[in-house]
Amino acid sequence: MVYTIRPKRSYSDTRGEGARHVVATMVQFDERKDKQSLFPSVKRRLSRKVPISPEFTAMTTGHGKLRAYLHRFRIIESPICPCGQQEQTANHAIFDCNIVTRQRNDMIRKIQEAGGKWPTTCEALASNYLQIFSTFVRGIDFTIL
């Protein structure tokens, strides 16, 4: 691989173009229909202080530790959750999986104590109940999920 050295003055010439590219990429992401709805826009995600961990990332993006994602890349044979109900997606883990019933019930109780209703939307989890949702994710033992 060959790299060329560019003079410093040439960086300022492309900075505007780079910023336009970042904005265009954000708009393209915001318009995607298949993205997870926990963070419906890049701008909103960047405005939030989000507790980052591999588990939290998996639950908010659908990438990583979830069986449906791993199956998609043929890393594992089956996308079915160990609970046996359906494919193990983020939505399944958040709303339906009986392996995390205790953690979900704690989350529901805290959301209701905060004046919220259950079931709620993924967007509400990320915008109104981010700390409660983060506690829910930290309480999950992903080695058995």
Image: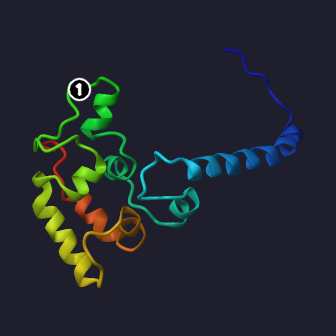
Outermost residue on the top side: it is 1
Query: Is 81 left or right of 123, judged from the image as shown?
Result: left
Image spot of residue 70 (x, y percent): 30, 32
Q: Nearer the viewer, residue 113 or 37?
A: 37
Query: Is 21 left or right of 137, judged from the image as shown?
Result: right
Q: Amino acid at mark 1?
A: Ile
Q: Nearer the viewer, residue 93 or 138?
A: 93
Quarter where residue 9 is shown: top right
Report the residue at 10% width, 44% height from top: 83
Query: Is 134 left or right of 126, judged from the image as shown?
Result: left
Q: Residues within 10 Å of mark 1 (few under 14, many from 20)?
A: few
Report the residue at 36% width, 62% height from top: 122
Image spot of residue 95 (x, y percent): 23, 58
Report the residue at 28% width, 45% height from top: 89
Image spot of residue 86 (x, y percent): 18, 42
Quarter where residue 140 is shown: bottom left
Q: How is the image coloured?
A: rainbow
Q: Residue at label 1?
A: 76
Q: Quadrant of the N terminus?
A: top right
Report the residue at 11% width, 60% height from top: 101
Element at badge 1? loop
Image spot of residue 15 (x, y percent): 80, 46
Q: Quadrant of the C terminus?
A: top left
